Amino acid sequence: MTFLQIAPLSPASPDGLLLVGGGRNARNLICIFETAGVAIRGIVDDRPAGSILGHEVNFIASLDGASTDAFLTIADPDLSSVIRGRPALRGCRWPRFIHPSSVVSSHAQIGEGCYVGPFAVLTDVVLGPHVHLFAHNVLGARVAVDEFTVILPHATVASDVRIGKRCMIAMGARIHAGVTIGDDCRIGVNAVVRRDMPDRSLALSQHATRTRTRISFAE
C-alpha cells in the first residue's frame, strides 16, 4: 500500500516535501511523514528560528513563487487559509497525504493538500482542499467537509453530515447523522452535536473538567 493513495508526490521533485508552518504541528507531521517514507526538504515560516528535528526553517517569502511540492502544517483553520493565499506560494503544488494505516474508500473524493492521519476511516466522503483529519477520525457515508476544516483525534462524524469551511472540531467530539455545520464553527472537546449549527457558532461539552488540589497521604 502506498502512503499517498490519491495523488503521490511528483517524481520530478526529488528533494521531497516542503512544510509550510514551523509550529508545534510541524513536529508531529515531520515524525509521521518520515515514518511513512516521505522525505522533508525543509520548512518555511514567517518567523523562522533555527531548525526543527534537523530541518532548517526559512522565510515563506524566500520561495517567491518557486515550483515545489508543499504541505500546510498550520492547524488553525483561519491562519492556514490566509497563509495559503500568499503570493510566495503561488507556484506550489499541494499533494494529498493518506497514512497507510487509514482505511479510505475508493469512492472518497479528496481535495488537494488534504491530510488523513493514522487509523482514520473514510467511506464515500467528499473533502475540500486542505482538510486535515487526524488519528482515529471516523467519517460516515456521504459526509462532506469543506476547505481548511480541521478534525482532531478521535472525533467521529456520522453519515449525511455537512461541515463548512474553516471549522475546528476538537478531540473526541461526536456529530450525529444529518447535521449541518456552518462555516467558521468551533466544536469543543467531547462535545456531542445533535442539531444544525449556523455559521460562526460554538458547541461545548456540558461536562467541564474540574481541577482540585492533589491530596497527599505522605507525612
Image (cartoon, rainbow, N blue to C red):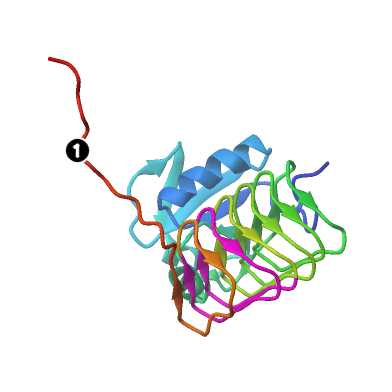
The residue positioned 26% from the left and 45% from the top of the image is 211
119 relative to 173 in the view: left or right: right
Q: Is residue 9 visible?
A: no
Magenta span contains residue 173? yes
Q: Which quadrant would the N terminus be assigned to in this image? A: top right
x and y percentages locating residue 55 in the rendered image: 47, 42
Relative placement, left or right, of 14 versus 219 is right
Q: Is residue 114 visible?
A: yes
Q: Nearer the viewer, residue 102 or 211?
A: 211
Q: Residues within 10 Å of mark 1 (few under 14, many from 20)?
A: few
Instruction: Please say if 179 is above or below 4.
Output: below
Task: Please tell me which residue lies in front, 74 or 56.
Answer: 74
Q: Secondary structure at mark 1?
A: loop
Tell me the quarter of the image containing the C terminus: top left
- Location of residue 38 by image quarter: top right
Q: Farthest residue in the bottom direction?
A: 198
Report whether 133 appears left or right of 204.
right
At x 74%, y 73%, the residue is 160
Amino acid type, label 1 = Thr
* 21 or 130: nearer the viewer: 130
Q: Position of residue 98 (x, y in %)?
A: 71, 51
Q: Which residue is mark 1?
A: 213
Residue positioned 61% across, 51% down in the render: 17
Q: Position of residue 81 (x, y in %)?
A: 51, 73
- Above or below: residue 137 compared with residue 184: above
Q: Which residues are magenta?
A: 160-187
Q: Main secondary structure of the magenta part?
A: loop
Residue 16 vertical position relative to residue 34 in the rendered view, above or below: below
- x, y (%) of residue 31? 55, 38
Viewer-nearest residue: 205 or 88: 205
Residue 124 image-quadrant placement: bottom right
Does the magenta-highlighted stretch encompass residue 5?
no
